[in-house]
Amino acid sequence: MRSLSSVVFSLHTFVVVVWAQSGIIIRDYFVHKNVTRVVGFSCGDTESDFLTIKLLNAVGITAMIKPAGFQLNVLRYLETDRTLGVFLDIRCPDQNISGIYDEGLDHRLFDYSYNWLILGANLSDSVRSLNDSGFSVVTDFVITVPEEEPNYVLYDVYNHFKVRGGALNITRLGTWSEMKGLEVFLTEPKIIRRRNFQGIRTKVIGIVLNRPKNEVSLLEYLERDKLEIMDNWPKFGFTILSHVASIYNFSMEAIEIDHWEKNDSLGPVMGALKRNVADLAYYPSILTHERYGHGRVILQQWPTRTCFMFRTIPAEKMKTWVILKPFALDTWCSILALVVIIIFVLSFILKLEHASDYSYSVSALVAIAALCQQGFPSLSEQSASRMALIQITVFGLLVYNYYNAAIVSARLNEPLHKMNDSLYSLAHSKIKLGAEPNVFFNFLLRNARPDVQYFKRYWNDLPDAGKFISIEDGVQRMKKGGFAFHADPDDIYPSIDLEFDKQMICQLTEVHLLQPSELGLWSNLRSHLHEISKIAMIRISTSGIRRREVRRRQARKPYCPTEEIFVSSVTIYEVAPMLILLLFGMALALFVFGIENLMFRFMHSQRKKDVLPLKRDKPLPKGKAPAKKRVSLAQPKKNALSKNAPTTKR
């Protein structure tokens, strides 16, 4: 009886020692991982659980332990937004191991946010109970088993990608002993030491529209470096993912999509990622809130924009004040003041010289004729008037030349008044519109921005015939003017560079539908490649490879030589103000002529009424005969006759 009691006591002591060692291992490991919160699933020994919590709290780690055998909502305890330590004791027979693993797989509990520590009896049984379908290169999963009492061995367990043929990798991580405590041999970051994917074949998907199906394979089409201007987006994305694959030693199987259903609001790539058809997308896509439920953005990589392009042709509207534009307001006021002074001074000089006509109207006519470089009469032969006329001529010549030089310079240097980069302005301009038949055009019109929605209503009201045309036809219609064409600049710039001359290129105006932004490369929601792809893309960007690929795939914007001056014919819109002024002068002259003619006729008729006609055949009555008056004739003065007598030229 005494011997049986001693055996029971020894077993109890052994169990207590084992549980105490387990608590110390848990403490040392999570201190090494630098976590502040721990959730544990134990075998239900209250004394051991209390000891473990006490050890963790002593080093500043908050802990919560749930015993085995209970129906647990694992996500309730393990959901976190920062790093969480989790330990699981699988040495007890009633532990729900498979249930915990399955929920961890469903809720992605084996990613970088969780540090798992498994307490097992031996390595083979511990590995046999695993469900590593959710393991990835970022999984932090360690199994500790006793080796030689009281020593323990820790194994690092991960799987690159089980769904794509990856194998379970078990690596000796370190040891624990009472004398030395925890010793870790693998000190490199886990991404670096696990970077060799050993050629696992992954699936990538994208939209490719212009591949000649019978001439070249998809892989060759995406990789070849020819002077092609189409499908730049998928080619760039595939090149970036190829660099990622070369860094981590995995291969890619490319999947091609060549259509976009009209009612598909998110795009076929997002649908494929949600269905786990592919692991990564090599087609850069726009970031929207709706798409976050279908995939995960790895990193924004491809800078792009789309816009309506058209030519801004100068002088499409009549410029009413173009006649007054060469001189500033103060210059015009100064010229007008000088003209008034000239009129008064010239009239005064002519009056002093007893000229035949020294009225203000004649002086004004002389001043205007000098300004317009027209001839004027010589009103006097005296020196003063001739000097005045010479001064007026020089003044008119200078003003005339300055005016001509200013109006020519203003026309040559006048900047193009291009339309604002606004869809409101484009819709109000009533210009004819067209678009490249792109798969994402209708998706761009779904943008919630007010200007896009306003333009969408205007676009939908247009007749369907002629809305979507090829790039070649669009460039030709842009060349004629009065037509705005929507396209990806990378697709249309080469055609514009070939078809447009320098002046047309400088007249090119762009109104953006998709504002300049960076499109992202995506992975599916459960992708095992998401984190490593992000790390690799950051390295690709910082090393300059991304910048090189962008320059390689993006089309060069047609160059506009701003230092050159382009001479073009004067249009009717520019001449219209002068013609209107001429017509106004002609109409005014006709009006004055009509008034003078009417006044002349009226005065002539009044003069006839005042003169009584003499009728010889009807003598006056005898009593009514007029009395005779004595009339004396005087010889008129010589100068008076020549000065006052009216003369008529025939």
Image (spheres, rainbow, N blue to C red):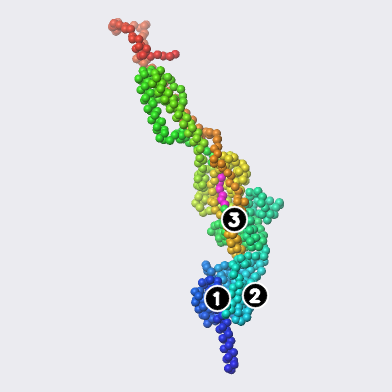
Q: CA distance from mark 1 to mark 2?
A: 26 Å
Circle 1 crowding by C-alpha within 10 Å: few under 14, some 14–19, many from 20: some
Which residue is denoted by mark 2 in the rendering? 128
Which one is earlier in the sequence, the residue at label 1 or at label 3?
A: 1
Q: Where does residue 474 sit, x and y in percent of width and height? A: 60, 44
Q: Which residue is mark 3?
A: 544
Residue 391 in which image quadrant: top left
Give the residue type at disc 3: Gly
- How would you rate the neighbour count of disc 3 (Cα within 10 Å): few for under 14, some for 14-19, many for 20 or more? few
Residue span colored magenta = 304-310
Q: Is residue 455 above or below residue 340?
A: below
**Which residue is most to the bottom?**
1
Left/right placement of residue 385 relative to residue 539 reads: left
For marks 1 and 3, give the CA distance: 42 Å
Q: Going by the picture, which residue comes out furthest to the right?
A: 214
User: What secondary structure do most residues of the magenta stretch adopt?
Assistant: strand
Name the residue: 55% across, 35% down: 568
Tag nearer the camera, 3 or 2: 3
- Which numbered disc, 1 or 2, marks the residue that appears first in the sequence? 1
Three-letter code for the amino acid on which mark 1 is drawn = Asp
Q: Residue at x 59, y 94 (%)?
A: 1
Disc 1 marks which residue?
28
From this viewpoint, is residue 205 visible? no
